[in-house]
Image: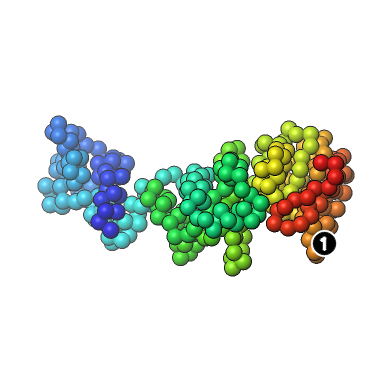
Amino acid sequence: MGEDLEKLKRQLPLLDYLRQQNWTARPVRPSGEFVGLCPLHSETRPSFYVNARKNLSYCHGCGQGNDLIRFVELSRHFSFRQSLAYLEQYNAPPADPAAVLEKAVAFYQQQLDRCPEALRYLKQRGLYDPAVIQELRIGYAPGGSLRQHLTAQGYSCDLLRRLGLINARGCDAFYRRVVFPCCQGGRAINLYGRSITAAVAHRFLPRSKGGLYAWEWVQQCPEVILVEGLFDYAVLWQAGFRHVTCSFGTHLSPHQFQQLCDRPRTVYLTFDVDTSGSGQQASQRLTYQLQAQSIAAPRALARGTRSKLLLWPGW
């Protein structure tokens, strides 16, 4: 606790905080001492001194000597805990969701090589090339350390909860999941967590997934392979197919459909063959919708499971 308090006070020096609160002062010593009117009581002659080197203040008028936390307690009538919460929020980096997600992606990437069970799962799904795994920025969430990693960089727990990265108990929301970043304009806008066990469900963050996955890479292509899942995408990418995109399921959003129809092209539909027939039905329905927009849409239903795609002849 003591180390955290000292770190907070170093990150936000008392003099900087006072100036941000419109406190005006003049230097009185070359050593870094400043004087101005006391913010804690009314006065006409400056008696409030701040020693920038020691990060402390003292008022000769009211007799109060304070560090940053004590000053906030007195000036805002907060308790000690309320002052800490206020300063953590006050000192937090700007709440740019993409920046936070990018840091989470980098953290998950670092964890992947340290977790043999996650690497085994990737191989079971047919994904084994380290270069492809790195290129697609695939990571793993072992759980227990994301919150500590991000709060140490100044992001508040409240922000992490609002983004969906941690749950109400402060635990990693992607625990025991392989994590794919969904990017737009080169920045992460969402994360997809694929569970490596049957005990927990797959999940996205509670925010927009954007359009088709990696659409910026293929939007100029005259032929596009459309798959429903990110593992299907990754395995095809590993096999050398670069004109592939993913719809995150068999039901396209209006925006995703418009992306496919933005110019004349051929869209190869490679949805999974399900025992229930849902993949086949979705593929047939989408074929008709695309053809109505003058888009060629031959179907090449993926056979088998675990992303081992066997495409129809002619590919």
Vertical placement of 284 versus 48: above or below? below
Above or below, 243 against 86 in this view is above
Circle 1 residue: 277
Which amino acid lies under the numbered mark 1 shown in the image of this protein? Gly
Name the quadrant of the N terminus. Answer: bottom left
* Residue 2: x %, y % from top left: 25, 56
Left or right? Give the position of 268 relative to 152: right
Give coordinates of residue 106: x percent, y percent.
Answer: 49, 45
Q: Position of residue 63 (x, y in %)?
A: 12, 52
Q: Residues within 10 Å of mark 1 (few under 14, many from 20)?
A: few
In the rendered image, which quarter is residue 290 located in?
top right
Q: Between residues 173 and 314, which one lies in front from this camera angle? A: 314
Q: Nearer the viewer, residue 199 or 114?
A: 114
Horizontally, is 17 left or right of 190 in the view? left
Q: Position of residue 207 (x, y in %)?
A: 59, 53
* Residue at 21% in and 37% down: 25
Q: Is residue 233 left or right of residue 14?
A: right
User: To which quarter of the image does residue 183 belong?
Assistant: top right
Instruction: Tell me, yes or no, if residue 43 can be seen here.
Output: no
